[in-house]
Image (tube, helix red, strand yellow):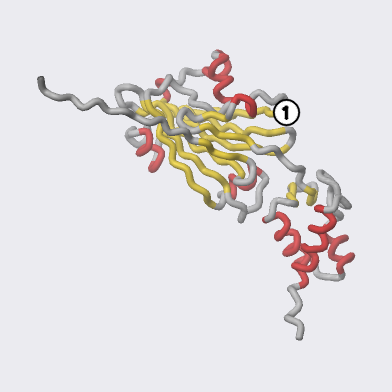
């Protein structure tokens, strides 16, 4: 006795997956139009889109707005080094890696004001950075610095800051301590759009807070990477304590 037949969109996804994994459809190749595929498989476009959604969720296919569905090229995984917060130098030095930066002055509100320990409405320098490997989005960073610590043009005038942006490192003053909170979660619509990832594919989200020796927060950053493209590495150094005894 045979079991029930799988839903039609799963059959289509299985067939397309087989063509992709065996190389009949090449990495970077554009799939036929959704209408064309629906006609080929003799299904509605709704069913066809469900099949494509399966492959998008698996990371095999990406939909680029206005262009169509493409087989994703295999991407080399990058490494995010925790503790001081940076992409590893090898990744950041890749000729194919480039970062676009938008800067603005914004006001501290809600959770952001709490992270920076500033009154609501305090002026902040905001840097929105998107890194790309070739034409594929690699990571997204939103970095906030108290305005008095980030003079105008800091990214243009200081080579070290430009390098820090490329590596997603701390942009502000050299910190005495960095605290990072890491979680895996679904992307927000804005993150999914910037990173060209499926809405159900998990991202690695890192909240980084850097403080100086006096305990002042000099930077808060929100970093987001597609979960299948980055490893986060944290190294813990053993601490030794000397017991003081009275003479």
Q: Which residue is nearer to you in this view: 46 or 177?
A: 177
- Position of 205 with respect to 213 (left or right) is right
Q: Residue at x 37, y 33 (%)?
A: 116
Report the quarter where the N terminus lies.
bottom right
- Label 1: few (<14), some or many (≥20) within 10 Å? few
Q: In front: 119, or 28?
A: 28
Give the total of numbered labels: 1
Q: Does residue 1 appear anywhere in the picture?
A: yes
Q: Report whether residue 153 is seen.
A: no
Does residue 11 lie above or below 133 as drawn?
below
Q: Give the image location of residue 205, x and y in percent.
A: 52, 43
Q: Residue at point 79% right, 51% down? A: 69
Q: Which residue is mark 1?
A: 96
Residue that appears at 71% across and 60% down: 54
Work out whether residue 23 or residue 53 is closer to the camera in this orientation and state it.
23
Name which quarter of the figure residue 7 lies in: bottom right
166 lies left or right of 56: left
* Residue at the extreme bottom of the image, as rendered: 1
Extreme-front residue of the structure: 247
Q: Position of residue 143 (x, y in %)?
A: 50, 32
Q: Is residue 194 above or below residue 175?
A: below
The answer to which image quadrant residue 3 occupies is bottom right
Q: Left or right of 79: which side holds 32?
A: right
Left or right side of 102 for 97? right
Q: Quadrant of the C terminus?
A: top left
Q: Residue 207 at x, y = what percent? A: 46, 39
Q: Position of residue 237 (x, y in %)?
A: 41, 30
Q: Which residue is depicted at the point 55% across and 44% down?
A: 204
Classify 130 as above or below 51. above
Element assignment for label 1: loop
């Amino acid at each position: 006795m045979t079991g029930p037949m799988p839903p039609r969109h799963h059959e289509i996804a299985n067939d397309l997956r087989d063509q992709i994994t065996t190389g009949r459809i090449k990495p970077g190749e554009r799939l036929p139009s959704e209408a064309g595929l629906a006609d080929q498989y003799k299904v509605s476009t709704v069913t066809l889109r469900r099949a494509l959604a399966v492959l998008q969720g698996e990371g095999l296919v990406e939909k680029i707005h206005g262009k169509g569905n493409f087989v994703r090229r295999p991407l080399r995984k990058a490494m995010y080094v925790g503790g001081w917060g940076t992409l590893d130098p090898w990744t950041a030095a890749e000729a194919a890696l480039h970062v676009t930066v938008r800067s603005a002055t914004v006001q501290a509100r809600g959770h952001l004001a709490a992270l920076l320990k500033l009154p609501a409405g305090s002026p902040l320098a905001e840097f929105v950075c998107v890194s790309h490997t070739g034409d594929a989005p690699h990571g997204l960073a939103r970095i906030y610095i108290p305005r008095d610590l980030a003079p105008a043009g800091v990214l243009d005038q200081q080579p070290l800051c430009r390098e820090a942006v490329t590596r997603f490192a701390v942009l502000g003053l050299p910190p005495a301590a960095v605290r990072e909170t890491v979680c895996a979660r679904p992307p927000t619509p804005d993150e999914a759009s910037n990173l060209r990832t499926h809405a159900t594919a998990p991202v690695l989200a890192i909240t980084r807070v850097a403080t100086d020796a006096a305990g002042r927060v000099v930077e808060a950053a929100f970093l987001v990477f597609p979960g299948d493209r980055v490893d986060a590495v944290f190294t813990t150094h053993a601490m030794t304590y000397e017991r003081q005894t009275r003479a």
